[in-house]
Amino acid sequence: MISTIIFAVLAFFAIVGALVMLFYKNPIYCALGLLICILAIAGLFALLSAPFLFMAQIIVYAGAIMTLFLFILMFLNIQEEHLPKEPSKNLMILIGIILMIPIDLLILKAISKLPNASMQITNDGFGSLKNIGLNLYVNWLFPFELISILLLVALVGAIVLAKKNKRGNK
């Protein structure tokens, strides 16, 4: 019973954060709405017994990414008069909601036809750091290393382009 209440509260905050991102024009308020949504989703991961995803959501998204977003927004000091006009924003949101209703009804119909079986589909320890680390470094070692090399090449390329642009501007 308590987990249902916690789920409802976290889902409410995730939806409210998303609505703040949609309807507020001030970029700082939108970023704070995104932060509320991210933290609520992290709570949902904790409720699902996924400690790695919970911590990654808090550290990476709520911590690093949101700090970067807020820093950039405050650094740029974007005023409301500098933002583009969006006269049909509310209409587009309404059209998006209307287009999603059939998909939502289809999902609800499929869920209602599920048998009343146990919803325990994971083993104990699912989502733990040990299991994720073992799976990542045993079964997915080669793709993991390829991605790290790709990111390193992209970083070196960005530095080379930045240096080339800096020399060209002098």
Image: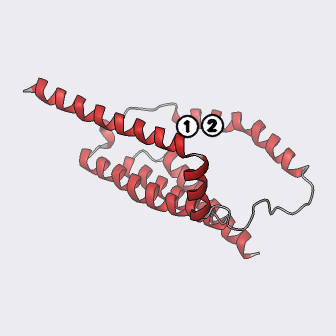
Horizontally, residue 145 falls left or right of residue 134, namely left
Rendered position, 22 above or below 58: above
Horizontally, residue 111 falls left or right of residue 55, namely right
Amino acid type assigned to the residue bearing label 2 in the image: Leu
Secondary structure of the residue carrying numbered label 2: helix
Return the mark for residue 94: 2
Q: Quadrant of residue 25?
A: top left
For mark 1, what is the residue? 90
Q: Quadrant of residue 7?
A: bottom right
Q: Position of residue 9 (x, y in %)?
A: 64, 66
* Gap between marks 2 and 1 measured at Cα: 6 Å
Q: Residue at 29% across / 43% down in the picture? A: 78
Secondary structure of the residue carrying numbered label 1: helix
* Of the pair 148 and 70, the residue shown nearer to us: 148
Horizontally, residue 157 falls left or right of residue 36, namely left
Amino acid type assigned to the residue bearing label 1 in the image: Asn
Q: Position of residue 44 (x, y in %)?
A: 63, 62
Q: Mark 1: give few (<14), some (14-19) or many (20+) Cα within 10 Å.
A: few
Q: Position of residue 165 (x, y in %)?
A: 18, 27
**Do residues under tags 2 and 1 come within 8 Å of each other at their CB atoms?**
yes
Q: Position of residue 127 (x, y in %)?
A: 63, 61
Rendered position, 24 above or below 93: below
Residue 43 visible? The answer is no
Where is the C terminus found, in terms of image quarters? top left
